[in-house]
Image (tube, rainbow, N blue to C red):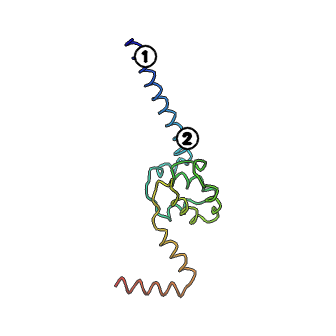
Amino acid sequence: MNKEKIVSANKSILETIEDARSERRQTERTGINILPKELRFLFKTTQFEINELITLCKDDYRKIIVVLITKVSPENIEGYSFIDRFRASPFIFINLLALHPKSKVRVKGSLKYAAVKILRRNKTLFDLARKIYIKVRG
């Protein structure tokens, strides 16, 4: 009887080990292995500047950005079809992914980036903002 318990315990241990291995293989396939080798060091990063991510937006950037922000492949994200509509604008695409509940990183500098973009389009607003900044800064 003790032998049967030991055998069943061994079987359950082996099953849990196999489950853990298969889960690990699955996460490796969907996470870091999607990234190109030169960008794999960014996978463990938990904070990004918006400018860093926008510089990565070349050619078909969607998979890379999704993996960096959510740590999973695009197929595993609910509502990705809606977010994918904004692929023409990397700034909006990145911010929508950063706001998604599955997001694992913080994206900093979005407000500053948007403000500078708006101010660069209007020279008088840019001059006014610069004067205010100089006065406040002292």
| Image height of 43 relative to 23, above or below | below
106 lies left or right of 123: left
Give the mark nearer the N terminus: 1 vs 2.
1
| Crowding near the residue tagged with mark 1, few <14, some 14–19, many ≥20 C-alpha atoms within 10 Å | few
| Crowding near the residue tagged with mark 2, few <14, some 14–19, many ≥20 C-alpha atoms within 10 Å | few
Q: Which x, y percent locates residue 55?
A: 54, 62
What residue is pinned by disc 1? 7
| Image height of 21 relative to 36, above or below | above
Q: Which x, y percent locates residue 25?
A: 52, 36
- Quarter of the image with the N terminus is top left
Which quadrant holds residue 84?
Answer: bottom right
- Quarter of the image with the C terminus is bottom left
Q: Nearer the viewer, residue 117 or 102?
A: 102
Count the marks: how many?
A: 2
Q: What element does badge 1 sit on?
A: helix
Q: CA distance from mark 1 to mark 2?
A: 33 Å
Q: Which x, y percent locates residue 33?
A: 54, 43
Name which residue lies at 44% across and 53% down: 45
Q: Amino acid at mark 2?
A: Arg
Question: Which label lies toward us, 1 or 2?
Answer: 1
Q: What element does badge 2 sit on?
A: helix
Q: Which x, y percent locates residue 72?
A: 54, 48
Name which residue lies at 48% across and 71% down: 111
Q: Amino acid at mark 1?
A: Val
What residue is pinned by disc 2? 29
Name which residue lies at 40% across and 17% down: 5
Q: Residue furthest front?
A: 1
